Amino acid sequence: MDLSQVKQETLAIASSYKPERRFILAILQDVQRKYNYLPKESLVIVAEYVGVELTKVYSVATFYKALSLKPKGENIIKVCDGTACHVKGSMNLIQEVKDILGIEPGETSEDGKFSLETVGCVGACGLAPVVVINDEYHGNLTPASLREIINRYRGGENHGK
Amino acid sequence: MEIIIDGKKAAVQEGETILQAARRNGIDIPTLCYSDALPGITSCRICMVEVKENGVTKRVASCAYPVHEGMEVTTDNETIRRTRNVLLNLYSARVPHNKDIKALKEKYDVPEIKRLQVNKGETHLAENCVLCGLCVKACEEMGTNAISTVFRGAEKKVGTPFDEPSDSCIGCGACASVCPTEAIQMTQENGVRTIWDKTFELIQCKECGKYFATAQEIAYVKQKIGNDMDMALCEKCKQKGNAAKFKEALKAELDI
Amino acid sequence: MESKKTILVCCGTGCLANGSQKIYDAFKEQLKALELDVELIPDVKGTGCHGLCQKGPLVHILPQQITYVHVKDSDVPEIIAKSITNNEVIDRLLYFDAQQKAKVQSKEDWTFDKKQMRLALRNVGHIDNESIDDYIERDGYKAIAKVLKNMKPQEVIDEMKHSKLRGRGGGGFLTGLKWSFAAKAEGSPKYVICNADEGDPGAFMDRSVLEGDPHTVLEGMAICAYAIGANRGFLYVRDEYGLAVKNMKKAIEAAKKRGFLGENILGTEFSFDAEIVRGGGAFVCGEETALIASIEGKTGEPVQKPPFPADKGLWGKPTIINNVETWSNVPLIINKGADWFRSIGTENSPGTKVFALVGKIANTGLVEVPMGITLRELIFDIGGGIPGGRKFKAVQTGGPSGGCIPESKLDLPVDFDSLTAEGSMMGSGGLVVMDDRTCMVEVARFYMQFLYGESCGKCAPCREGIKRMLEILGDICEGRGQEGDIDLLLEMGEAIQESSLCALGKTAANPVISNIENFREEFEEHIKNKRCPAGVCKDLTEFYVDAEACKGCTLCAKRCPVGAISGEKKQLHVIDSEKCTKCGICIDSCKFNAIKVK
Amino acid sequence: MAKILMIHPDKCASCRNCELACSFAHEGVFNPNKSRVHALVWERLGLGVPLMCMHCDDAPCAGVCPTGALHRDEEANGVLWDKNKCIGCKLCVSACPFGNASYDNETKQVIKCDLCGGDPQCVRICPNQAIEYKEANEGVMAKKAMYAEKFKKVFEEVE
Amino acid sequence: MNIKYFAYIRDFTREKETTWNDPADDLQALLQQLSQHYGKKFREAVFNETEDDLNNLIIVLVNGRHVAHLDGIHTKLQASDQVSIFPVVAGG
Amino acid sequence: MANSFQNKVLRINLTTGKVSTEPLNESYAKDYIGGRGLGTKMYYEEVGTNVDPLSPDNNMYLVTGPLTGTMAPSAGRYMVITRGPLTGTIACSNSGGYFGSEMKYAGYDVVVIEGKAEKPVYIWINNDKVEIHPADHIWGKEVPDTTDLLKEETDEMAKVACIGPAGENLSKIACIMNEMNRAAGRTGVGAVMGSKNLKGIVVRGTNPVHVPDGERFMAAIEEARKVLAEHPVTGTGLPTYGTQILINILNQSGGLPVHNFRDSGTVEWADKTSGEFMIEHKNLVRNKGCFSCVMRCGRVTKTYKPYAGFGEGPEYEAGWGFGADCDVDDIDAICQANFRCNELGLDAISMPCTIACAMELYENGYLPKEDAGCDLSFGNASILADLVTKTAYREGIGDMLAEGSYRLAEKYGHPELSMSVKKQELPAYEPRTLQGMGLNYATNNRGGCHVRGYMTSPEILGLPVKLDPAVTEGKAGVCKTFQDLTGAVDASGFCLFTTFAIGADIIANVVSAATGIEYSPDELLKAGERIWNLERLFNMACGFTGKDDTLPQRLLQEPQKFGPYKGSVNRLHEMLPEYYELRGWTEAGVPTKDKMVELGLEDAFAQMLGAVEAAAAQNN
């Protein structure tokens, strides 16, 4: 990635907020949305922009789950492991993804296509167990139906992006 | 103002915490994360005491709970001890070889919970950090902000951004100094100080050759007090230099 | 002339996940196309959650009061043709009410709805969440007008105090009392905050309000701001709640335009502005001091109380934080009066509570009931009981901070104090129903796992204690449990409760402790006999096919994801325990209960 | 009236009793290395110069201290150190232009004169009155001015 | 009579020695004469409080002999005597 | 229990280069207090009585007292214990300054030097770190340069004890100098160090010295301090005039030895060399104290042309030695000669006394002019400094002067002109005036020595009692008590001068408070007596007998020429029997078994007898 471009883009994102510490999280969220992760240079720019030491920004960037310092896959598979989904077998779904992609929660597949995350409740308990792929909800899943869905994404059909 | 600590009346001052009041009255309460310089961290939780006020009994962190007229404080009872025992066992599960935690366990006669002391391989043997947060607060207080806590929960640790040598670290070692478990290593050898993976070429006293400070420390001092004095001397040589001036004056006066 | 028809398509997240957007779009398109031919103009409103998410997408047609469930976009032409143009009811799309054992035309008549009382959710599903006019039509911004014109701040506080409204976020602290602290507190400016960082795994009450009735939250906050002397408010909303953020943003803009927010509200001296802060995905930020830290741009780590936020909150200034549901109650209380409010619910817990009814229950969804209703009513009458003919085992309330309540205590009235007395808590309102296929040890481990990931790590008991408890629970679930583990868990649990810094830690051990207290034998079975009676803990489970019960229907063999079950049609099936991953899908799929746990 | 500390290098007998008194008062042991006052001795000249914190009005050590552990105390008319507030950054050591503060890594203490709570032990012990702690009345101030004149060069360079 | 003063007694007498004309005939009387002449500090140095004996911290030699081994304060004096007055001193 | 000992002995073998430490023998510490007593005991146990003082087999013990390094007033002393080359007796040479306390802070009560280095070396003791470094580049340098160079090479804050050229050249009157101007001066210990090729010992210590009960200790020393401050001698006299104050009183009292004791009694011009005069003449720059001293008797002095110089001193004995004893009335010349002694590392008592002896030999024509190389007449001020230098470098007559007066006088055939006891030169008190001092000289364990039984104090100064100097009666008892007390005082680390003001009760209290070992005043004296007797046993085992307890014949036979005691001689015979009796010795001055058992010295006694018998057998 072109570093100066990242810097410029980050600054552009940051500039939509006042240069105040309280906007660190918001800016980072926007950066995350843009790049699917937080490039190191962005953190430096954000720190400079809001006028705090890099540590403060880094600390925030590593604290919140919505933020990631590692590049994420093209498709983000969020398996809901809220209580409702859990009691309805979400661990079977997690196991299924692990088996299919060979990655653990929090990891990204080697081809960069998928990231696996487990999330708390996505608020769709009625459909438990639920998997959200790139903001698209898939409810009442079984391992078999999940495999089918993932295969669809694997086949190049890239929803949401 | 008066409160009762462990059944005894104790004179306390408005605005101080139970811990401060107790310690001033010679009552011992253990702490790891507390420092008068950096109060209010409240992370170590081994200073829990029982407080009775307005008919309510509760357990509070004595290091942050302000005294109120007439409150009754118990610093040692069954519950407090049980809690402390578990806590100290949790600490030693985290840092099994740390001598300061061992000493605390010994001091408070804490029975070993063996089940927790099994090293499951995840505990690095050299781990000494109990994440009390004093170092981070100290660095913050310095205004250098070279370190912070990173990640959260069980993965939480203290570090510099990206685990790289921090630009803002001045190598003062306040973090190491306030650490209650000697978890932060600051080494100094052959004129090089190393801390948080950052190495500092120390300034050598131009008189005695002693390595005495980092350039960043000196810059910090100059910036903070706006002083432009000669910073190339260690304190001993500064003092000696000062004394030498007196000496020269005396020598001249005595014509010797 | 026939009154104008209204089609309400549920566009809550649950329904959206089931494809309601497609349905909405289909209606929109097809109605538009038909407009040219037909005179009547059906009005489609995107609504908030109806509640019964499991049956979604739901479509409700007014004024006939027809509710369709499980609607597909392919059903849209038929609905337009039959129900809109001909007032005809399509039977196959109606809801089958298990209690009434009949199809019911309108959701108003569902047993699910009948026992409910919708105060907080009063507008949800009834208004277009993007229309301020809809809100105003239903008494919206009447309360703020009332307080600004007729009430002094102290009177507002008195009224709130008198209403005995308790914080719906879980703590149950008296809202009016809290406000009075902030009103008295020295320091300026003061702030109000809406805690919309709903993070309980298994709860989505706040989300539906934010999505479906954003203005009521803003109005509640404005009333509080007036009462305590604040001019600025923040809504801390989970970033994952994209729709909620979007709707709320629009609502703020609309309210500002109409003079309900901003400078000199309704021409008075009072000014109040609100802005949204998107949360970063940290359960702990539901804790008020952590939430404040997060708004300030710091990591969401709690700080020791006292001082309480009402004294020293955001940027050290007096701050009131209330939860979404609490805010939504406020305008209602002002409009209808504290006495009216107290006539609902119980003496010490007046009003209603919204619950997310989930888990092994027939009617999954959001419900709002008066306080004091029994758990049994909630689960069996409203929730429709346990599906699949299985046995009720426990209901978990309060999420990761709460506990499990066994069958013997199902007649417990639901209110703050009763639940707390049972070692659980109201929490924000998650109700997770568990059946005999739920392992209580594993549930305890699950909560610990959740909290392990969510503990901020600041204080030692929470960070280290949860980690070690999780280890031990993991050991038990995986057959490495040791004698004494149960007592050790209790001992550690108590220590964590006693010494943790914030509510997350203080309550973290609740699920474990309450599960042990109510289901100790199940723990012992795991430890002593290395057996998981519910058949959940894979290392302690072996499935077999009951030869007498198996009819040889082959369903289990078909569903088994690993091909571990073999058998010919109408022949006894066999499970290859080598291959079996103990996922339990066979059990859930067998209609004859032929698959058993050894 | 506030008291002031004065050193008279021309009176020092190099006996270093001040160092002993100081280390005992502060450490409970005898250890000149940990004394807050040092009598620096030029053996060849038979001269000793007692040096210690002079409690500057605008003390750089206090100025640089991040926690206020080192602070000017008006009541004591001195620069005092609060052990409990010290975080061991040691920058006061660098800040003092006279080298009159040092840091003990073992005990984590700043070693600097604290006036012994108003009764400086070095003053009490000095047999030659080379260190004095007196009320800043006219006579004393005049004496101080005299000394200042006498050691003009010294003060000129350090101030 | 020749009288010599030593050490800080000289501070009181402001002279090292003196020839005392018309001296008294015993030591006590002489010292009183001298006290008269030199003043209070000298008096305090040589006498005890009641002036009936020598200060314990004074050494008076008459012709090189310590008066303690003569007649003490009552040692008789002659005009030719050599009197030496020292404070207690020591060294080695 | 933490006490004021460091409980550690450092042992350095220069032959092997081996450095080791060992714990202090607690029972030695208890019985012998420390310092002189402890060192003598260790020497006795480890080395025995049969070594040549200048051989590698002779050990040197640098020993501090339990009070060294504490705040006990004027108690910063250390002692060098070895066998003295000048006397052949046990040697204990005691010095103040900072070296002793620094050694204590480095963590050691005792530093033992064994063997002999192949080439010149110095020892660098930096707390736990002990190193032996080559010293070729420093060898030959005078004391001030040596001190500065060694500090430069090690640590500016370090303290240096070293020898000058005199010690290197094995002068039997060489000292070990510390902080340039303090000396472990007598009995030739500097030569022992030189014989080991050891140029110096550098020490730096940053450890604490503890006391068991701070409050008690501070109370004890507060009492001592108060007495010392208020006493006219220790509080006023010594700080103001130093020890040179004694010139006038000794002169007025007729106790001043003159012209190598030939024309003793009194001299007209004495005041010109007095402490009072040094102030008047502006020799005195300021006073100076050793570590922890409250008396500050040290003099920082400067001198004027033609003897211009700068340095410290002189002490009374040196002032008298270069003054009255050599008939020199020029204080500048006296001071300058004294400066040279310090710079070259020579004993400023034995040195002038040896010169005085040479002058008498010269005047009597026994010492030929060609040997003298200059005009050695009494009163020749101009040669003093030069003679000191020659002695240190053993140039010309210096080569003989370096051997001390006895060997010098013996060489020129008139040993009776050496005013010495056991070959060590007598200090500045005329025994024909001070009868008791004569007894002390005669019986002293290290020969001609005034500080081990300072009879001047009662006989001239009237402290603590006034004894008529001319009388012999009762002197034996006082002398013994003084000798015993001095043994204990030296062992403790206290400066002997404190005893002008404080007595055994206060000393015992302070020592008890520091060590945690309770000593009553009697027990303290008993420990001193034990030390004295152990030294005596050692000497006897080395061949000394009661016959050596004597004075130069001149003092016993030649009537004194001047002063109030004109015509008197020392009547040693009147005092010695009583002295032996009081000591519990035989009439021949041999310690008895009973007494030795009483003192717990039966083992040493048996060894002594063995050695005496062996010597006798050899003679037969």
Image: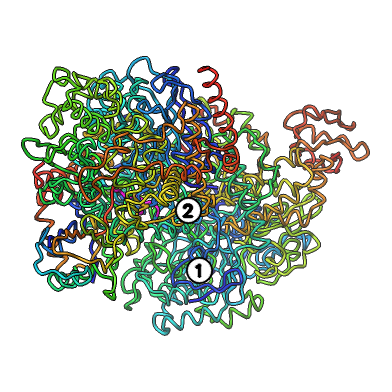
Is C340 located above or below residue C107 in the figure? below
Q: Which of F48 and C510 is in front in this view?
A: F48
Left or right, residue C312 beside residue C430: left
Q: Nearer the viewer, residue B112 or D29?
A: D29
Determine the secondary structure under disc 1: helix
In this rendering, does residue A35 appear at all? no
- The disc labelled 1 sits on which kind of residue? Trp
Answer with the quarter of the image where residue F65 lies: top left
Q: How crowded is mark 1: few (under 14 residues within 10 Å), some or many (20 or more)?
A: many
Which residue is disc 1 drawn over? C327
Answer with the quarter of the image where residue D21 lies: bottom left
Is D17 magenta? The answer is yes
Which residue is disc 2 drawn over? F508
Q: Residue at x 38, y 23 (%)?
A: F132
Where is the C terminus of chain B found, in terms of image quarters? top left
Q: Which of marks 1 and 2 is in front?
A: 2
- Residues in magenta, as a range: D15-24
